[in-house]
Amino acid sequence: MIQAALTALKLPDLRNKLIFTALMLFVFRVVAHIPMPGVRLDILRQQVAGEGNQILGFLNLLSGGALENFSIVALGVYPYITGSIIMQIMVPLIPQLKELSKEGDAGRKKIAQYTRLATVPLAMLQGIGQIQILRQSSPSPLPADFGIIDTIVLLVLMTAGTLFLLWLGELITERGIGNGVSIIILGGIIAGAPTALGRSIFGGENLLGLAAFVAIGIVMIASIVFIQEAQRRIPVQYAKRIRGNRMYGGQSTHVPMKINSAGMIPLIFAFSLMLLPGTVATYLRTSDVGWLSALFSTLADWFSPANFPYWLFTFLLVVAFTYFYTLVIFNQQNLPETLQKNGGFIPGIRPGRPTSVYLLRVLNRLTLAGGLFLATVAVIPFIAGAATGVTAVALSSTGLLIVVGVVLDTMKQLEAQLLMRDYESFVR
C-alpha cells in the first residue's frame, strides 16, 4: 500500500490527481473555519463537546467539525448522505425509479440528479433542526433577539454551504482520487483527531488508561479491515453458447458476497434513531405535570449514552438495520435474474427461484455475522470508556468505519490506476 502511494507520486498524472485532492481538502478546511455572524462560538463549542447534547456531537462528526465553528458548511454533506440512503431505499419500491435504474449510465445519472435535488429540502430541514436545538440549549449560543429573518438567512447560507461541499466532492471524484464526498468526511474526522488526543494527553487523563484506549482502537481498526475485506465466493459456471462460428461461455468464476455489505449505514441509522428520543426527553423532562416529568426523566436517563440501556438498544437496532439495508441492496442487484439471463448457474443449484432461495440463505448467514460485528463495534466506545476511564477522547465507531472504509476504497482506486499503467510489480 505504501509502495503504491510512493509509486503514484512518481507519475505526473497521478501526482496531479493527488495534489488536486489535497487542494480541495484544504479549501474545505478553510471554509469550515469561516463562522456565520451573530453566534457565540465559545458557548457552541461547550454544547457540542458536552454529554448533554449528543446529537450535536454526532452531527459535528458528520460535518467534519464544521458545526462547532457554526461555519457556512455546518451541515456538512449529511443531507446528501440522507438523500442517497432514501433514494436507494425508494428505487426498488417505486416502479419508475426501478425502470430508470435499469437504463445503464444514463439512468444512474438521472437518479443522481434526483438525489442532488432532494439534498436541498433535506438541508433545509436539518438546518431548522439544528437552529432549534441551539435556540433551546441552555445557555443558547444564538442571540436573544434572533428572529425569523435571521433564521431564513442562516438556512440559505447553510444549504448553500452543503451544495458547495457537494460540488467540491464531485470535483474530487472527477479530477482527483477516491470518492469525493467520502474524502471530505474523512478529512473532517482526521482533522479533529489531534485536538482530541492532545486534550487527553495534557488534560490530566490516566496515561495508562489512554494507552489501553489506543490499543483498543488499533484492534478495532484491524478488525474492521478484516471484516470489510472478508467475503464468501459463490462459484458460478457459465454454459457454453455458439454464435456463428464462435463458442462463448463455458468458464468458471465466482460471485463475491461480503460479510459486511451494508458498510456504515446501519450505524448511522441506529445512532440517529437513538439520539432523537433522548434529545426530546431532555427538553420535556421539565414539564409541570409530575408524572409526565418523571416519565421523560426516566426516558432521558435510558437514552443517555452514559447508561447501559442506550447501548443495549443501539446493539439491537444495528443488527436490525443491517438486515434491512442488506436485503434492500440485494433486491436492487437482482442477482439471480442477472445470472439466468447471462447463462450462469451455481453448480448443484437450479436456475431461477432455487438460486434465489440459496443466495438468500447464504446472505442471511453472512448478514448475521456482519450485523453482530457492526453492533459490537457500535458498543465498543461504552466498553472502552468503562474499562479505561478515559472520557476526553470519543472512540467513535462510525468515525473509524468511515476512515477505514474510505482509506481502503481510495487505495484500491489508486492501485487500479497503477495497474492501468502497467505497474503490476508495485501492487501486491
Image (cartoon, rainbow, N blue to C red):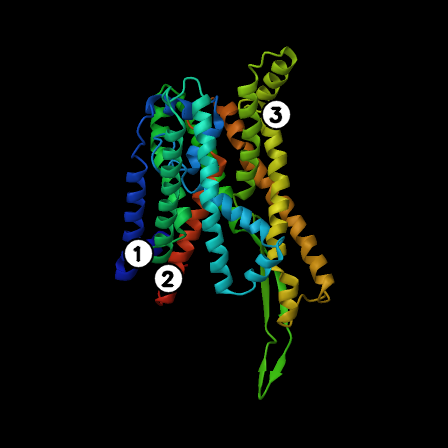
Is residue 391 in view from this perspective?
no
What kind of element bears circle 3?
helix
Question: In the picture provided, is 46 more to the left or to the right than 250?
Answer: left
Q: Position of residue 216 (x, y in %)?
A: 48, 33
Q: Position of residue 289 (x, y in %)?
A: 62, 12
Q: Which mark is residue 417?
A: 2
- Tell whether label 2 touches label 3 (CB within 8 Å): no
Q: Position of residue 207 (x, y in %)?
A: 39, 23
| Circle 1 residue | 17
**Residue mark closest to the camera, 2 vs 1:** 1
Question: In the picture provided, is 170 more to the left or to the right than 53?
Answer: left
Is residue 266 in view from this perspective?
yes
Q: How many marks?
A: 3
- Tell whether label 1 touches label 2 (CB within 8 Å): yes
Tell me which numbered mark, 2 or 1, is placed earlier along the sequence: 1
Q: Between marks 3 and 2, how big is the CA–CA gap?
A: 47 Å
What kind of element bears circle 2?
helix
Kind of residue at disc 3 = Pro
**Residue mark closest to the camera, 3 vs 2:** 3
The quarter holding residue 212 reads: top left
Quadrant where the image shows the C terminus:
bottom left
